[in-house]
Image (cartoon, rainbow, N blue to C red):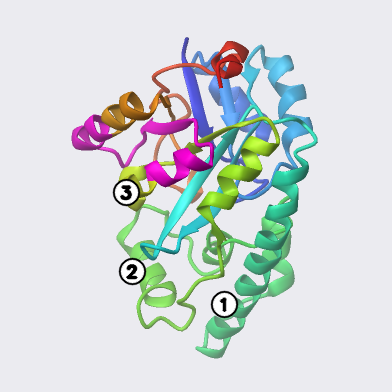
Amino acid sequence: MRVDLHVHSHYSDGSNSVEEVMKMASANGIEQISFVDHDTVNGLPEILILGEKYGIEAIPGIEISAYDFKRDRKVHVLGYNYQPEALHIKSICQSLLERRQAHSLWQIEQIKAAGYELDVKAIIETAKPSTTIYKQHIMKHLTEASYTSPEYKQLYRKLFKGDGVASGDMEYLDAVNAVRAIVADGGLAVVAHPGQLDSYDLVPELVEAGLGGIERNHPDHKAEDHQKVEALAKTYDLVMTGGTDYHGVFGNFIEVGDILSPGNLINSTFAHR
């Protein structure tokens, strides 16, 4: 099967609607897909309906913004095939969305104070149907340069990194609690792109919390990462997943299906867990 288990839509920080992504997936022969929008499952009803429309199996998904407080680094945790109600996931994500929105509004004010013109109401409209503003939405109102251009990267670093006026971050959730919430909702918890965020050392601790998978195929992963993921998957009996981490024009130039998962997620995947 041609499977992409890591795509984003305008329900979080992707630039495309669910239907636009589904059309691309259909054109590229994708048979199974998972939208893993950040800290929200609001798009799931539409995703399931459009999956049927385009003949693509849509796996419920989410990417939770978490943190490894022991090693002081971010960790992203993917959740798949959870119960549609997702009560535990929604419970932990609501506070994350509120914190992100408050932080984004603060960032906008800092950037305005530095002399840039920004209209909060216009940015909120750009973010819809997401109820949360992301840095990509702010950047869209600051520059017409593409995400991959030197101009965009320079401005982004100037504002959001290091000593930038809008640097700093929100308070994240403990990664262990993210895994537990996904498992409590009957889902498969997967550590996302461990090579990108250097999450390898945390895997044994997450396994104890119920981690069932690890992402192997990702745009930021190299051959060395593939080897590390394969070794951990073998040691801890973890499912390997993967995908494009597609964000449309809000991300690197890549199309849905350019990077595929090493396997698909069917109900039998979870039967032994």
Which residue in the protein does label 3 denote?
Answer: 201
Residue 258, image quadrant: top left
Tag 1's secondary structure?
A: helix
Residue 225, image quadrant: top left
Which residue in the protein does label 2 denote?
Answer: 154
Looking at the rendered image, the disc whose residue lies closer to the viewer, 3 or 2, is: 3
Question: Where in the figure is residue 174, as x and y percent of width and height?
Answer: 54, 58
The 10 Å Cα crowd at callout 2, few under 14, some 14 to 19, many 20 or more, is: few
Which residue in the protein does label 1 denote?
Answer: 107
- Please indicate, yes or no, whether residue 153 appears anywhere in the rendered image: yes
Residue 31, image quadrant: top right
Tag 2's secondary structure?
A: helix
From the viewer's perspective, is residue 114 above or below residue 28? below
User: Amino acid under label 2?
Assistant: Gln
Region of the chain picked out in magenta, as a range? 203-228
Question: Where in the figure is residue 74, as x and y percent of width and height?
Answer: 43, 58
Furthest toward the front, the residue is: 208
